[in-house]
Amino acid sequence: MGQYVPMLAHTPRHGPAPDPDSLIRIATVTAGEIRRLVDACISRGDQFLIVLLSETGLRIREALGLRHESLRLRAREVRVVPRESDVNAARVQ
C-alpha cells in the first residue's frame, strides 16, 4: 500500500493548488444560490431537503436515511444513525 493521501489533498485549503487538468472541482454554493434552488422546488419536501443539506452538511444518502425521530428541530439536532433496515438502501456507510 502507498502513503495515505487525504481525499481533499488537491484543494487549496488542504494542500497545493489544484491541478488544472484534474476532473475534480470543488464549488461553494452561495446563500443566494440556495435560495434560488429552494424557490424553484415545487414540493415542500424538496425544499426541506435542499435546506437540510445546506444547513447540516449531510450527504444525500445520510439525509435520505433519516427518520422523523432523527430530527429534533427545537433542539436544532439531527441524528445520523446507521440502520440495517433502511428500505431505500440509503443508510450511512
Image: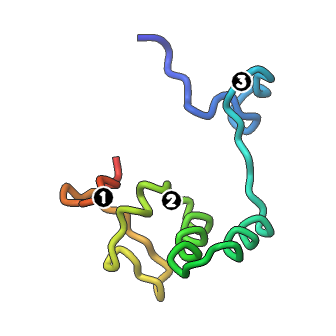
Residue at numbered disc 1: 88
Asked if 19 appears above or below 80 in the picture, the reply is above
Give the residue displayed 33% in from the left and 73% down from the top. 67
Distance, label 3 to label 1, CA atoms, is 33 Å
* Residue that sits furthest to the top in the current view: 1
Image quadrant holding the N terminus, namely: top left
Q: Amino acid at mark 2?
A: Leu
Give the residue displayed 47% in from the left and 84% down from the top. 73
Under circle 3, the secondary element is loop
Q: Residues within 10 Å of mark 3 (few under 14, many from 20)?
A: few
* Residue that sits furthest to the bottom in the current view: 74
Question: Where residue 61 appears, x then y in whole percent?
Answer: 42, 54
Give the residue displayed 71% in from the left and 77% down from the top. 39
Q: Amino acid at mark 3?
A: Ser
Question: Where residue 50 appears, x then y in whole percent?
Answer: 59, 68
Residue at numbered disc 3: 22
**Upstream in the sequence, badge 3 or badge 1?**
3
Residues 70 and 65: in front is 65
The reply to whether callout 2 and callout 3 are in contact (CB within 8 Å) is no
**Upstream in the sequence, badge 2 or badge 3?**
3
Residues 10 and 33: in front is 33
Tell me the mark number nearer the camera, choosing from 3 and 1: 1
Q: Amino acid at mark 1?
A: Asn
Find residue 58 and name its label: 2
Distance, label 2 to label 3, CA atoms, is 25 Å
Asked if 54 appears above or below 41 in the picture, the reply is above
